[in-house]
Amino acid sequence: MSQNVHTEEATTTAADGTVLAYQTRGTGHPLVLLAGQANSHHWWDAVRDDFHSRRRTITVDYRGTGASGKPEALEGYSTWQFADDVIAVLDALGIERADLYGTSMGGRVAQWVAARHPERIRRLVLGCTSPGGPHAVERDAQVRHALTRTEPGAAEEALTDLMYTPAFRAAHPGPYGTLGDPGMPPHARRGHLRASSGHDAWDALAHIMAPTLVLHGDQDRLTPPDNVPLLASRIPDVTTRLFPGARHAYFEECRTEAGTMVLDFLSGAPL
């Protein structure tokens, strides 16, 4: 489904002076794509071109990743700060209103964008994410332990297994763009972990005015699918869909179905 559409790269500046790198590709109504924790825009490399038949896509290198600045802020990073950075990019592009698709931590960031700036978001897609805070269903202790193993390659192998099923990995042996930005300094990686772990948008979800689609793999252990009904209980105008057998990276493993579903939802077609 790749169209080999040219990517334009640019930078702008956040309110605190941090350089923010962003990338635009294609033509049409703008669709902002937000990546997972500790990842740059390359998170979307495998599926990004699927949207260009109908949308211009915009990606952002979060502060701490890619070509963006990597400040050692005393107060750390936060998902609401990442959301403000997204608005700074939209302002730099002169975009008043966009569609927004956030996955994993990007879904958490997207919650803040849509809740705090409802006039800027036309339609919202939240993938493999949670509301955070005490109401969220967190990953189990076995998963947390696997991700902190110190043997060479063990944590990466655990993360890859949480992202993709064995069948998908056999057919698509990688490399995978969803396993973290290798150029991140340690302080930025820690900052992203704290930002995602500290997210709590439970009260803010009721302020999301955009029609919202919530997507999730039903075998996701990194962010359990029990978070889907929690999000649905708080967002006023919401549709939910689960992908049977899929893990965290459902958007790659169920690429054709998920991409088509997102585009249809964004265009207002019934799902």
Image: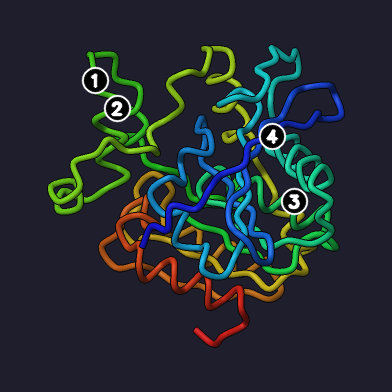
**Whole-number angstrom distance, CA of label 1 to CA of label 4:** 34 Å
Residue 134 makes an appearance in the image: no
Classify mark 2: helix, strand or loop: helix
Classify mark 4: helix, strand or loop: strand
- Amino acid type, mark 2: Glu
In primary-sequence order, the first of circles 2 and 3 is 3
Contact, mark 3 vs mark 4 (Cβ under 8 Å): no
Instruction: Tell me which residue sits at (58%, 63%) in the image.
Output: 125
- Amino acid type, mark 3: Val
- The mark closer to the camera, 3 or 4, is 4
Classify mark 1: helix, strand or loop: loop
Q: Label 4, on which residue?
A: 10
- Amino acid type, mark 1: Gly
Q: Label 2, on which residue?
A: 156
Q: Label 3, on which residue?
A: 113
Instruction: Tell me which residue sits at (30%, 57%) in the image.
Output: 253
The location of residue 35, given as percent across then percent down, is 53, 43
- The mark closer to the camera, 2 or 4, is 4
Contact, mark 2 vs mark 3 (Cβ under 8 Å): no
